[in-house]
Image (spheres, helix red, strand yellow):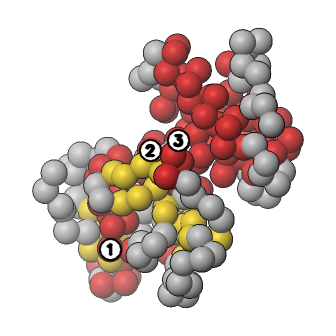
Amino acid sequence: MAFVRAIPLAALPEVERQAMRLDGDVIVAGPADAAVWIPPDQPDDPGFRASLLRPLVPAGCVVSGATAAWVYDGLCPGRRLELVAERRRRRPVRRPDLVIRFARAPERHVVTIADVRLTSIPRTLVDLAVADACDVNRLAALWSSVAGVRSDDERAELIEESRAAMWRRRGAERAAGRLRAALGPEWDRPDRAAPTR
């Protein structure tokens, strides 16, 4: 995929930004504090959304939370760029447009899209569910956007991986309740047992 040059919001005067948006010449994409303007006819898919983040993600970090969910489904990207970094790595640069959480991100929970590392769909669901400001509707929206194009077996595998990603996480019980509310009966199918210790 060819990389489309996105224009950082700060690069344009406010009057020009508003006029271009109202005329339909550009749309805003990405987390609000790191948003860019792109042509409205640009195909919007996970690869393109991830490519927009490529220059914004510091080395050693993995895109997570609401930002990873936005890459997958194209809905609300959140206010700031959410990242995960391991404690043992060198401390990433501090920027006001970043939220960096120090946690483990095992390779089985990480995927690469357009050369950007981000948390897998199951890990992203769990990250959203354990957050204090969790929105069950946001969980349901992410699930419906990714589950609708998958078979029953693939959806069951995503749920099993979500359960495994949740194991030993602080707030796991609360997260399970939120995922149950968002995913409905699929979460509670009797053939899905919790991971064994």
Q: Which one is nearer the viewer's eye here, 35 or 160?
A: 160
Nearest to the observer: residue 50 or residue 112: 112
Query: Percent from the top left, x then y, of residue 63?
Result: 49, 61
Asked which secondary structure carries label 2, the reply is helix
Secondary structure state at the residue bearing disc 3: helix
Q: Which residue is located at x 57 percent, y 58 percent?
A: 105
Figure quadrant of residue 24: bottom left
Which residue is disc 3 drawn over? 121
The amino acid type of the residue labelled 1 equals: Pro
Which of the marked residues, 3 or 2, is nearer the chain's N terminus?
2
Residue under numbered circle 1? 55
Q: Quadrant of the C terminus?
A: top right
Q: Which numbered dot is residue 72? A: 2
Looking at the image, is 60 positioned above or below residue 191? Answer: below
User: Can residue 162 be seen in this snapshot?
Assistant: yes
Left/right placement of residue 149 relative to residue 95 reads left
Q: Do labels 3 and 2 touch, CB within 8 Å?
A: yes
Residue 180 position in % (x across, y down): 77, 29
Point 64% across, 28% down: residue: 160
